[in-house]
Image: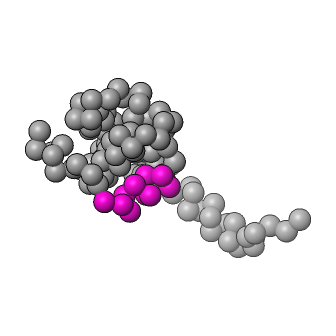
């Protein structure tokens, strides 16, 4: 089995790791500066506009009303928050590719939702 580093490279890496700057540093938290509340708030707004339950928005039904609500939610969440498509998809129990699919299509009632 070969090592990916030479002995000289290992010595250099050990010196770098021994540096007190690296010993005192801690990894950043994953959701720094991001609060999960805006997505929940947007979810309520969309559900109230379409008169559906939050479970229906994240459910598996493919009725056009639910699809329209999901698409508008994805557009609102992506444009108005800093969350990734993965996080947005988790809130509606969808994959990030499903969120991207919704984002590639035109929203249905986004202007009416924002005006309410």
Where is residue 106? Give x, y as percent. 31, 60
Magenta residues span: 96-106
What is the magenta segment's predominant secondary structure? helix
Q: Is residue 37 something that shows in the picture? A: no
Q: Position of residue 47 (x, y in %)?
A: 29, 32
- Residue 15 is left or right of residue 111, and the answer is right
Label count reads 0
Is residue 102 located in the magenta-colored stretch of the structure? yes
Report the residue at 85% width, 68% height from top.
Answer: 2
Residue lying farthest to the right in this orientation? 1
- Residue at the (15%, 46%) spot, across then down: 112
Query: Residue at the spot x=68%, y=71% of the render?
Result: 9
Residue at 47% in and 41% down: 62
Judging depth in this view, the residue of 92 and 14 nearest the camera is 92
Measured as percent of width and height from the top left, residue 114 is found at: 15, 45
Q: Which of the image's four quarters has the N terminus? A: bottom right
Q: Is residue 6 visible?
A: yes
Between 48 and 91, the one nearer to me in the picture: 48
Instruction: Name which quarter of the figure residue 55 lies in.
Output: top left
């Amino acid at each position: 089995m070969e090592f990916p580093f030479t002995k000289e490279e290992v010595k250099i890496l050990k010196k770098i790791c021994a540096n007190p700057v690296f010993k005192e540093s801690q990894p950043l938290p994953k959701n720094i500066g991001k609060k999960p509340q805006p997505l929940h708030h947007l979810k309520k707004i969309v559900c109230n506009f379409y008169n559906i339950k939050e479970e229906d928005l994240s459910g598996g039904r493919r009725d056009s009303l639910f699809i329209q609500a999901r698409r508008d939610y994805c557009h609102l969440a992506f444009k108005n928050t800093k969350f990734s498509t993965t996080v947005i998809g988790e809130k509606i129990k969808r994959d990030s590719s499903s969120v991207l699919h919704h984002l590639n299509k035109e929203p249905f009632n986004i202007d009416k939702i924002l005006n309410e």
